[in-house]
């Protein structure tokens, strides 16, 4: 069922018993899937390589790595831009180990459209930081992934977004609350502009900071709704991990 903005928030907040709540939302006649995570209590992780060093690349491969620990994915999506070898374009931290340094200078493509930002996962919270703010604060992230551009910065849309842009793609991103307890992941089901996508996070989802993760290649995994988007191998993947049900 596709829900409008007037009913969406009530439904989302009423279902907080779930590890992840995914709902369809229509905003300004554009369709999205929105998944809200209680970042204060849920196990949010980033995944890139397996124990053998090979890139995982697929939601199914991530699930396989979790089986020995009695865990499984309940939700996942691609989590930042990557090179041809699937290595992260920007800053990347996994389980406390930095694998790629922060990149604070402007550059080509969407990643270099400053300001860009970092999605940081710490104990009991998750935050989207603008990159220079991240450098100044130096938070101790267990997991972190850098991408760009920022969609929303302190409640304002990225200054380079144009209301009349014609650049439309399937896009995905993440927004967080000021207190770090809400992490809201979104994938568009229609082709959207940056201005439309950022406006969703600002106006409909109420996240003061939001980060674009990628476009065109965007994919989502949602166990509860039997969704697992297929495609070529991904780079970084963000996922919510839960215990596997006992037999």
Image: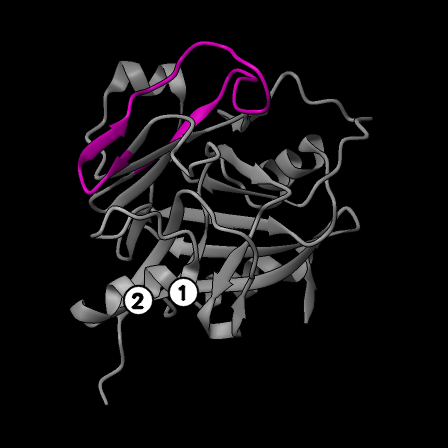
Within 10 angstroms of label 1, few (less than 14), some, or many (20 or more) residues?
A: some
Q: Residue furthest top?
A: 105
Task: Please say if 205 is above or below 160.
Answer: below
SS at mark 2 in the image: helix
Point out the stretch of residues depicted in magenta: 93-120
**Can the viewer see residue 159?**
yes
Q: Residue at x 77, y 46 (%)?
A: 28
| Label 1 to label 2: alpha-carbon separation | 6 Å
Where is residue 218? Give x, y as percent. Answer: 57, 47
Q: Is residue 189 left or right of residue 186?
A: right
Task: Please say if 202 is above or below 3.
Answer: above
**Closest to the observer, 220 or 6:** 220
Q: Residue at x 18, y 34 (%)?
A: 97
Q: Residue at x 55, y 66 (%)?
A: 11
SS at mark 1 in the image: helix
Quadrant for residue 138, please give it. Answer: top left
Q: Residue at x 17, y 67 (%)?
A: 69
Cβ–Cβ under 8 Å for marks 1 and 2:
yes
Where is residue 131? Give x, y as percent. Answer: 39, 19
Q: Would residue 81 be counted in the magenta stretch?
A: no
Residue tagged 1: 60
Q: Is residue 165 left or right of residue 72?
A: right
Q: Would residue 106 be counted in the magenta stretch?
A: yes
Task: Find residue 64 and name its label.
Answer: 2
């Amino acid at each position: 069922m596709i829900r409008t903005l007037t009913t969406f928030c009530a439904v989302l907040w009423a279902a907080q018993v779930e590890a992840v709540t995914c709902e369809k939302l229509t905003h300004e006649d554009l369709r999205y899937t929105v998944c809200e995570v209680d970042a204060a209590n849920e196990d949010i992780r980033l995944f890139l390589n397996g124990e053998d060093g090979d890139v995982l690349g697929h939601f199914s491969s991530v699930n396989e790595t979790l089986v020995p620990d009695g865990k499984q994915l309940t939700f996942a999506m691609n989590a930042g831009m990557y090179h041809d070898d699937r290595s992260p374009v920007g800053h990347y931290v996994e389980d406390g180990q930095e694998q790629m340094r922060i990149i604070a200078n402007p550059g080509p493509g969407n990643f270099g459209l400053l300001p860009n930002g970092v999605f940081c996962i710490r104990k009991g919270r998750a935050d989207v930081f603008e990159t220079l703010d991240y450098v100044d604060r130096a938070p101790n992230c267990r997991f972190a992934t850098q991408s760009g551009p920022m969609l929303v910065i302190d409640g304002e849309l990225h200054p380079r977004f144009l209301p009349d842009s014609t650049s439309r793609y399937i896009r995905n991103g993440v927004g967080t609350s000021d207190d770090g307890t809400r992490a809201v992941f979104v994938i568009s089901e229609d082709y959207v502009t940056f201005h439309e996508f950022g406006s969703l996070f600002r106006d409909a989802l109420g996240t003061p900071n939001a980060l674009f993760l990628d476009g065109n290649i965007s994919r989502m995994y949602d166990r509860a709704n039997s969704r697992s988007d297929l495609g070529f191998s991904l780079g970084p993947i963000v996922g919510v991990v839960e215990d596997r049900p006992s037999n």
